[in-house]
Amino acid sequence: MNKKRVIVLAAVTFLSIIAYTQTSGFLEPNQRSALVVLIVASGLWTSEAVPLAATAILIPLMQSVMGIQAFSSALTPFFSTTVMLLLGGFMLAVAVEKYDLDEYFAFLILSRFNTGAKTVVLAVMFATGFLSMWISNSASTALLIAMALKITDQIKDEKGNFSKIMVLAIAYSATAGGLSTLVGTTTCAMAAASLKTMIGYDISFLGWMVFGLPIAFIQILVIWVVLFMIFPTDVTDIPPIERPNGGLSKNQKLTMGIFLFAVFAWITGKLPGPIANTIGWAGHGYSSSMVAATILVLLYFTDLIEDRDIQNGKWSTLLLIGGGLSLGKALEVTGLVDVISDVLMNLTAGGSPFVAITIVVVAGLGISIIASNTASAGIFLPIAIGLGQKIGFSPVILAVAVGISTSLDFMLPVGTPPNAIAYSTGRVTMAEMIKAGILLDLVGAIVTITFAYLIWPMLI
């Protein structure tokens, strides 16, 4: 056992004992137990002293041992409808990558914008953002960064800044694009799942896009401006992007068909009232999770994926989501979320919606800077929903704000997987990421708070 793990486990144990023994005067026994679970989960997730998935599994185990919930009840969130939604999305991404269809998508978009360095970078960013809406932001980052490095290696870059711009632009736009849909990044799906579990509110695939897509679009434009401002470059011309060899194979065409079906089916599950009234169709009515399950079956029935491909389905992420939802349920059934909400309500100037939004956005973003974005969402989502109920403000808005803000960190490699991929190229230093990331984090928080306070209440 390494030294860091021993220190973290000792610290978490000490804090848990103090919290359990010193709160007996105002917390019930099961609330004190839930507080211990929250401290352990937060400490281990934040420090990453043990694998995140291991902590996720520990959460239902602790609940059972400490008498919070039966083990079967604590395990129920591990195969919620959100887990199925993400599993279908992950496996669709596996098929897209397996048959190099993502490279074809990238070519279709990028080959039309060979008119100048700034235009090409913006096209690359929107291509990355678009792919991140439907496949994981990690996959779209890895693909387009590989293509970008081939491009930058062919040009004369005396200041060395253009490669930094390309690498960071792709990573950051993948993060921004992932905010647009429920399968783009895990924190969005977790927000939807928490709303369904805690208050029974079902947000549709298209419904989430109404919240996330405008922020993603604005954020990509801001990233583009900021990167060229911070890293001035004399590169003006970009070499043509080569077309992938040959036409589409049979498997690529099949994958393309299922991909297009997935996009259509996810978007048309439940149409907004004005659209439904105009066209006379409210949508097919099947949930996003059922669509994901259908996609998974189609991928297997067409032999596009096999048993050995299932290992690429990001199972550790699915376990992490299950752990986060299980933690939220523990806070809810014991009533601890109400206690925490009461404390936060005192910080909101008597229940001010603006202050509440600011608190959840800043806290969500702040936690994600030092911990994984998924773990941050798992910790803070139940608290934000409880706060909304306590002050009489829409918990939907606060949950969406947490889902987005916990994936808005552009400052450190640990913030999001795309950040880590960009840093691993060696083209950008930690100091340079922090320099660009601080400004982008600030802008992202301001944009999210503005939309949540002024625009989103009209969408509920």
Image: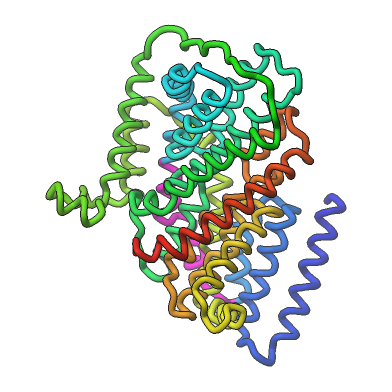
In the displayed structure, would residue 204 be above or below residue 26? above
Q: Quick check: can you spot residue 76?
A: no
Quarter of the image for residue 340 reads bottom right
Quarter of the image for residue 376 reads bottom right
Quick check: 89 left or right of 427?
left
The question of residue 69 being in magenta is answered with yes
In the displayed structure, would residue 18 be above or below residue 204? below
The extreme left residue here reads 280
Residue drawn at (68%, 73%) of the image: 36
Colour scheme in the image?
A: rainbow
Q: Quadrant of the C terminus?
A: bottom left
**Secondary structure mainly formed by the magenta segment:** helix
The extreme right residue here reads 3
The question of residue 247 being in magenta is answered with no
Q: Position of residue 186 (x, y in %)?
A: 51, 49
The answer to which of 295 and 284 lies nearer the viewer is: 284
Quick check: 160 left or right of 324?
right
Q: Quick check: can you spot residue 347?
A: yes
The answer to which of 348 and 88 lies nearer the viewer is: 348
Give the extent of the magenta segment: 67-88
Residue drawn at (44%, 70%) of the image: 395
In the displayed structure, would residue 178 be above or below residue 319? above
Q: Position of residue 451 (x, y in %)?
A: 46, 58
Q: Position of residue 38 (x, y in %)?
A: 64, 69
Q: Position of residue 292 (x, y in %)?
A: 36, 43
Labels in figure, total = 0
Quick check: 266 left or right of 213?
left
In the displayed structure, would residue 176 be above or below residue 25? above
Quick check: 456 left or right of 277?
right
Residue drawn at (61%, 56%) of the image: 375
Residue drawn at (48%, 80%) of the image: 391
